[in-house]
Every structure is written in C-alpha cells, then in structure tokens.
Amino acid sequence: MIYTVTFNPSLDYIVTVPQFVCGRVNRTTEEKIFPGGKGINVSMVLKNLGLENTALGFYAGFTGEELKRLVEEKGICEDFIPVREGMTRINVKLRSEQESEINGQGPAIAAEDIDALYAKLERLKEGDILVMAGSIPDVMPQTIYMDIMKRLAGKNLKIVVDATRDLLVNVLPYHPFLIKPNNHELGEIFGVTIEDKAKVVAYARKLQEKGARNVLVSMAGAGAVLVADDGSVFQAKAPKGRVVNSVGAGDSMVAGFLTGYLKEGSYEKAFQMGVCTGSASAFSEELATRAEVMELLMANQNLF
C-alpha cells in the first residue's frame, strides 16, 4: 500500500479577476476550489493513474470537513487526524495580470495529534511506500521528517521525501528511497547555482553520498535528471506544450515515478513516466489524468 502524508493541507481557492486593482472592490469571473497540499496532490495523481493509496494528515474546522469531502469525492481513501483548535487553511490563488497567493496558517497541531500520526504510521508493513511531501506548519517540530524516518527505520519501507533544505538534508542518513528536489533547491543545499544537467548529476551524487538512494531532479522547462541507486543516470528534455498551471507538477512527477516503478520495475520506465506525468499536470488546469499522461508518453519517446 502507498501512504501519503500532508502535514498542512489546504483548500485551494483559485479565483480569476481580469484586472485586479488593489484597494478596490474586485469581482471574479471564475472560481474553483480543490483539496491542496503536496501529499494530497500525489495521492490524487496516483489515483488517476490507477494506484490505490491512503492519504494521511491533519484537518480541523468546517474547512477541514470540506477537505475530507473533496478528497473522498476523488475516490481516495483518507485517514486524516482531527485537530481541536483552528481550521484547515484556505490558500487563495489570484489569477490576474500578475498571479498572487495568500496562504493561510493552518490549525494548532498539538503533541497528541502528532502522537496519533505516529500510531497510524506504526501500522505500516514491510514493502509499503510512504510519501512525505511539503512544508510543515510552525507549530510542529522542525525535525518531524527525520523523526518519522528514525521511528520507521526497522520496517523496511520505501520512503519518498519531497521537501526543501533541512527537512530534506536531515533525512538522508536514514536512506530515503527517493528524494525529489528541483535544481534550484539542490543548489540551495550546497550554496551553488545549478543550471545544467552535468552539475545536477554531480550534486545529486553528493546527496547519494549522504544517504539518498534515488535522486530525481526536476528542472522545469529544461527537463529532468534521475541519478539511480544502481549507478545509472537518466536525462530528458521537457515535453513540449503550453504551461497552464505549474502547481502540482512536481508532485505529479513523484506520483508518475512511483507508478512507473511499481508497474514496470524499471528506473528507466519510472523516470519516463515521472517526466510525462509532471508535464501533463503542467499542461492542464487540473492534475494529470491517465489519458493525458499516456498521450505525452507515446508522443515523446524521442526525449529519453
């Protein structure tokens, strides 16, 4: 079974205002609302690609109830933990001449809530896959990713981490199965600027030396690189298409990689599926569907 954890999920309220004017009353011409958070995005794309999974995380208040409803409406099994104080955050994404975002804080997650998450994670079995993705709220320990991996170290799980800076670096001694920084996040870790694939490979190997098994690096329009734990390196240009919405593209890449790996047992096929799934989401208003991914995969074999 695949499990995803989103520590600070949200309702993403996306509004379009053709000519937004600060300090004035503005009226929307389009509104959409989606369940948000990197782990939830991974869950939704996995489901679209035919892989059942369970979404873990925290929820609170009336917004939390709506989050649960929307996730269940997508056909995803959720096992969220209720939090007493506060409410699940609303992230407002304003589309106008310039795009702007206002992100909420999230509920007051207490020590007992974290203990409840640990109890759920203790039930995972050998061979299960755990995806931990995204930022964490200020009320949680900044070591939570590392703490979870340390607690689960003896279970022989495949753990995927999609996070930045210390959240990512601190888990490396526990040998995550897959990490997915982008090239800018990879550069931040080492204090360098990384723009080309040769540098990506060199610094991805440095992360392997620190304990990572497979390092998947997204480079937006420049493509992607996979440095695998068997020594192989795969590179690809980005599929061509019009970017409609880049939110969730990285999460989709993770979901595509896992789908390709589980169905084909091949890092090469996993990489190809990951690249095309990430691009399919970027080219769509919503997260990638299986049909969109397969169309890109068939049309872009020359990229790999």
Image: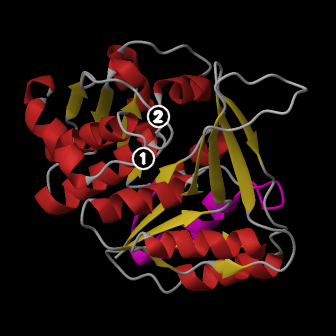
Kindly state the secondary structure of the residue where label 1 is placed. Answer: loop
Q: Quadrant of the N terminus?
A: bottom left
Numbered-mark total: 2
The magenta region covers 137-160
Q: Residues within 10 Å of mark 1 (few under 14, many from 20)?
A: some
Please give the name of the residue rendered at 23% of the width and 25% of the height, measured from the top-left corner.
236
Residue 258 x/y as whole percent: 29, 56
| As drawn, 55 above or below 44 | below
Q: Is residue 57 visible?
A: no
| As drawn, 175 above or below 17 | below
Residue 141 x/y as whole percent: 78, 60
Q: Is residue 273 visible?
A: yes
Q: Residues within 10 Å of mark 2 (few under 14, many from 20)?
A: some
Please give the name of the residue rendered at 33% of the width and 65% of the height, measured from the top-left corner.
47
Q: Which mark is residue 245?
A: 2
Is 276 part of what is drawn in magenta? no
Please give the name of the residue rendered at 85% of the width and 68% of the height, measured from the top-left corner.
108
- Of 40 and 169, nearer the camera is 40
- Of 30 and 204, nearer the camera is 30
| As drawn, 278 above or below 193 | below
Q: Quadrant of residue 166?
A: top right
Q: Are marks 1 and 2 in contact (CB under 8 Å)?
A: yes
Residue 97 x/y as whole percent: 64, 18
Q: Which mark is residue 286?
A: 1
Whole-number angstrom distance, CA of label 1 to CA of label 2: 8 Å
> Left or right: where does residue 87 sit relative to residue 234?
right
- Of 206 and 158, nearer the camera is 158
| Coloring scheme used | secondary structure
Amino acid carrying mark 1 in the image: Glu
Amino acid carrying mark 2 in the image: Asn
